[in-house]
Image (cartoon, grey):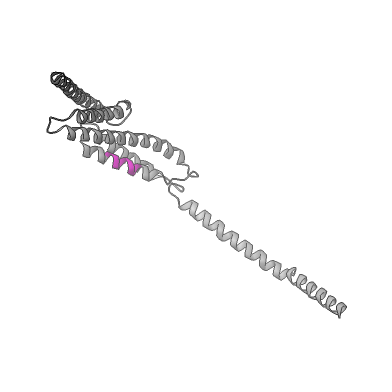
């Protein structure tokens, strides 16, 4: 019985080995593997080819330049707060057009150079908007005086924060002339709040001396 079972196991193992190694089965495995490879390669190739600016020209470069120029034109004169928001929107659209261009596109280098410039301009506009928000808060707190010393100090600090945000912007920044005008206004208002707070401190000191 032992030898019979062993022979039966050896025979079954030999049959299985011969089935696995048969030419038909190996051919099926090979064909299946080639088919999977073709499908995967085809999908990757299709994805690569359908990315923006991979085949042919790249109209996204020209369109993004158009939006960038619109943003700069909006900021040339004396822009309002809404003009700055519009310019910010145009710059963001320019960025959105160029960001999807892949590294395997021949236009990728040009797109990256433009992206760097547009991002710098957009960062400048965001700085201006943040400074304007600080100035708005300071102006709002300044309304309907007289105020306490603590309030004048808060107002003074808000003007200072607005100035500190705008001062580092260079001549290459968008709306540079507008920034310089705002800096003059903010510095004047900061000086006014400092005088008011100083006057209150002196008046309070005099009042305290008289009470003694």
- Residue 200: tell me if it is visible: yes
Split into 4 quadrants, where in the image is the N terminus? bottom right
Q: Residue at x 34, y 35 (%)?
A: 123
Vertical comparison of 57 with 124: above or below: below
Q: Quadrant of residue 22?
A: bottom right
In the shown orientation, is residue 76 left or right of residue 18?
Answer: left
> What count of labels does the image hold?
0
Split into 4 quadrants, where in the image is the C terminus? top left
Front in this rendered view, residue 41 or 18:
18
| Image: magenta residue range | 87-94
In the shown orientation, is residue 168 left or right of residue 44?
Answer: left
- Residue 66: tell me if it is visible: no
Q: Quadrant of residue 177?
A: top left
In the shown orientation, is residue 98 left or right of residue 176?
Answer: right
Front in this rendered view, residue 36 or 181:
181
Front in this rendered view, residue 31 or 120:
120
Vertical comparison of 121 with 190: above or below: below
Q: Quadrant of residue 116?
A: top left
**Residue 156: where, in percent of width, then height?**
23, 27
**Residue 136: where, in percent of width, then height?**
21, 35
Vertical comparison of 80 with 97: above or below: above
Furthest residue in direction bottom, as rendered: 1
Q: Residue at x 59, y 62 (%)?
A: 36
**Residue 84: where, in percent of width, then height?**
25, 37
Q: Please check the rendered image and state whether residue 142 is part of the magenta-colored stretch, yes or no.
A: no
Q: Please check the rendered image and state whether residue 93 is part of the magenta-colored stretch, yes or no.
A: yes
> What main secondary structure does the magenta stretch of the protein show?
helix
């Amino acid at each position: 019985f032992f030898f019979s079972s062993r022979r039966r196991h050896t025979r079954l193992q030999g049959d299985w080995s011969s089935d696995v190694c048969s030419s038909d089965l190996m051919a099926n495995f090979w064909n299946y593997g080639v088919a999977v490879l073709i499908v995967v390669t085809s999908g990757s190739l299709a994805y690569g080819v359908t990315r923006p600016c991979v085949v042919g020209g790249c109209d996204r470069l020209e369109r993004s330049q158009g939006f960038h120029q619109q943003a700069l034109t909006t900021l040339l004169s004396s822009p309002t707060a809404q003009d700055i928001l519009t310019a910010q929107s145009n710059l963001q659209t320019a960025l959105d057009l160029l960001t999807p261009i892949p590294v395997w596109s021949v236009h990728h280098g040009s797109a990256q150079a433009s992206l760097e410039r547009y991002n710098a301009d957009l960062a400048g506009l965001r700085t201006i908007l943040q400074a304007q928000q600080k100035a708005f808060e300071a102006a709002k707190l300044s309304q309907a005086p007289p105020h306490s010393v603590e309030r004048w100090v808060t107002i003074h600090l808000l003007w200072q924060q607005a100035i500190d945000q705008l001062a580092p912007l260079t001549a290459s920044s968008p709306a540079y002339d507008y920034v310089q005008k705002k800096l003059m206004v903010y510095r004047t208002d900061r000086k006014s709040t400092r005088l008011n707070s100083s006057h209150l401190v002196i008046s309070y000191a005099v009042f305290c001396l008289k009470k003694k």
